[in-house]
Image (spheres, rainbow, N blue to C red):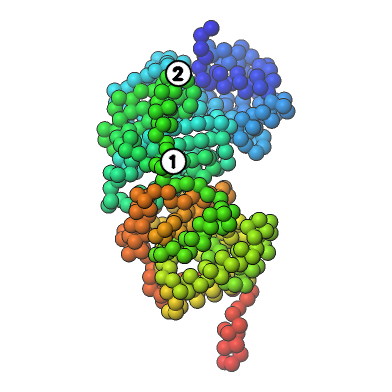
């Protein structure tokens, strides 16, 4: 029996799993049933002009006519929440497979992928398009290994390679069984692009929070672009320019991809890991990274959103009650002790804080506060108290704390990515990552070479190198007071001292 093309195989799989008969599908599509049989048999493809509409109707038919048992299986396979999301996932998968087969037909004269294909040279965009193989839609279980010299690529290509422009690798659901290990070459990154490169790493870590992602440093990645999906697919090439690859080989099937997968896997050693994962209980209670970070010399903080560090005593206590089971699990007394230590450190140690203006604005608009990686929502009156506290923290001349505001985005390419919180010190540093779909991840810096990158990154931003930093206390005061006025108008509250002045007048 001749092998089928990928579109036909997927269509057969979907209809078989859900027990949807050919004639039912034909009724939905208003096609003769013989067309359905030819598509599933792999003899012909739907016309390119109608492929989108046909895929949409196929997905709708399967959701509306499929067996309940089959739909449950597909929801699990695609790792979606309900039938509406399943319909969209199937449509995306069908279109991806159709485009893949049509590309084969146009470029190779066949609709069935050969086991091995070779290209003397490919534009990097074409290479990355092939790297985004339809097999990545199979999100229930994927094991991916890659060694990519991303910092040798042009900006638009490295963004496209990891789908940063869309804010995610596949999408924003959690995929615990999607495992992705990536080797990078850090040694030859351009020092003049340090801010961009650090923000790129921030965005990679944030965008890939939904999956089990590990990032390694390795000289092996120099000049290479290697990407392998275990037992399915591999593509390899040598970067000859920031926008081109040479000696590109594309492999289908387990036998052809396994050697490259095993080679990269053998280099993913723990001592080469750039960041290691940690949980909030470990951060607070187990290894006490939180406390060690506070007490370590030279503390520096990037705050991409408002955290418990900036809460006054009264709001901190209210937040503990609002956090409920999360606070119970971490230990309320433990959290209170941490808060006392944080307040003391901010008063007595030379803590330098870079706070995004957008973090304050977002907190005032939504009321959302990151309380030990638990999202709580303050009402308007609480937001007003928070702003009043920020005024005293940011604008007071007392104590050792120094605060500067980051105006706008450091790099325009990453405006859709939520800025992380980064806590740097001379002994231990960690990230608190959060993306737009509510996924959290904590990462500790694991290697001195990446610690050095972020130390320099902080100093460059602090000094206003290639970015807009507000360090004038009067300007910070004006900005926070402007927000405070808006919150007070919305809440109907006014500071007591202002009301007293009006009475005296």
The spot of residue 72 in percent (x, y) is 69, 30
For label 2, the SS is helix
User: Counting other residues with Cα less than 10 Å from the Cα at mark 1, is it few (<14), some (14-19), or many (20 or more)?
Assistant: few
Q: Quadrant of residue 469?
A: bottom left
Q: In this view, does 11 lie above or below 491?
A: above
Residue 243 visible at all: no
What residue do we see at 50% from left, 17% from top?
5
**Mark seen at residue 255:** 2
Q: Which mark is residue 270?
A: 1
Depth check, mark 1 against mark 2: the one in front is 1
Placement of the C terminus among the 4 image quadrants: bottom right
Give whichever of discs 1 and 2 has the lower sequence position. 2
User: 154 or 51, which is in the foreground?
Assistant: 154
Give the left or right position of residue 424, taking residue 82 as reference.
left
Please indicate whether residue 100 sits to the left or right of residue 155 in the image: right
Closest to the observer, 54 or 17:
17
x 47%, y 51%: residue? 444
């Amino acid at each position: 029996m001749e092998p089928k093309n990928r579109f036909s195989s997927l269509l057969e799989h979907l209809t078989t799993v859900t027990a949807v008969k050919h004639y039912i599908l034909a009724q939905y599509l208003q096609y003769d049933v013989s067309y359905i049989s030819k598509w599933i048999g792999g003899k012909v493809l739907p016309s390119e002009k109608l492929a989108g509409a046909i895929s949409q109707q196929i997905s709708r038919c399967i959701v509306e006519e499929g067996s309940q048992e089959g739909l449950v299986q597909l929801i699990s396979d695609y790792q979606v929440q309900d039938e509406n999301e399943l319909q969209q996932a199937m449509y995306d998968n069908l279109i991806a497979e159709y485009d893949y087969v049509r590309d084969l037909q146009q470029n190779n004269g066949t609709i069935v992928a050969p086991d091995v294909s070779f290209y003397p040279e490919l534009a990097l965009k074409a290479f990355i398009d092939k790297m985004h193989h339809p097999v990545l839609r199979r999100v229930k279980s994927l094991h991916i290994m890659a060694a990519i010299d991303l910092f040798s690529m042009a900006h638009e290509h490295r963004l496209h390679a990891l789908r940063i422009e869309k804010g995610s690798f596949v999408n924003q659901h959690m995929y615990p069984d999607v495992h992705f290990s990536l080797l990078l070459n850090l040694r030859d990154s351009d020092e003049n692009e340090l801010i961009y490169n650090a923000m790129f790493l921030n965005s990679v870590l944030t965008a890939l929070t939904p999956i089990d992602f590990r990032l390694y440093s390795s000289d092996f990645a120099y000049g290479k672009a290697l990407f392998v999906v275990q037992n399915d697919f591999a593509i390899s090439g040598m970067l000859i320019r920031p926008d081109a690859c040479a000696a590109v080989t594309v492999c289908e099937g387990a036998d052809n991809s396994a050697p490259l997968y095993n080679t990269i896997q053998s280099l993913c050693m723990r001592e080469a890991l750039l960041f290691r994962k940690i949980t909030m209980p470990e951060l607070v209670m187990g290894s006490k990274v939180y406390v060690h970070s506070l007490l370590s010399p030279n503390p520096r903080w990037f705050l991409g959103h408002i955290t418990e560090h900036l809460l006054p005593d009264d709001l901190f206590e209210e937040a503990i009650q609002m956090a409920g089971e999360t606070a119970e699990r971490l230990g309320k007394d433990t959290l209170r002790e941490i808060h006392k230590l944080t307040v003391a450190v901010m008063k007595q140690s030379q803590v330098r804080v870079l706070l995004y203006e957008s973090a304050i604005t977002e907190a005032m608009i939504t009321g959302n506060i990151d309380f030990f990686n638990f999202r709580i929502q303050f009402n308007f009156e609480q937001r007003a108290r928070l702003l009043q506290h920020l005024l005293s923290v940011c604008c007071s001349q007392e104590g050792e704390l120094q605060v500067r505001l980051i105006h706008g985005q450091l790099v325009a390419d990453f405006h859709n990515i939520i800025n992380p919180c980064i806590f740097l010190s001379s002994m231990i540093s960690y990230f608190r990552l959060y993306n737009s779909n509510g996924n959290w991840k904590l990462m500790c810096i694991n290697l001195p070479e990446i610690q050095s990158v972020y130390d320099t990154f902080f100093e460059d931003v602090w000094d206003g190198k290639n970015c807009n930093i507000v360090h004038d206390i009067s300007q910070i005061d004006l900005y926070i007071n402007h927000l405070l006025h808006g919150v007070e108008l919305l809440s109907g509250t006014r500071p007591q001292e202002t009301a007293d002045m009006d009475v005296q007048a």
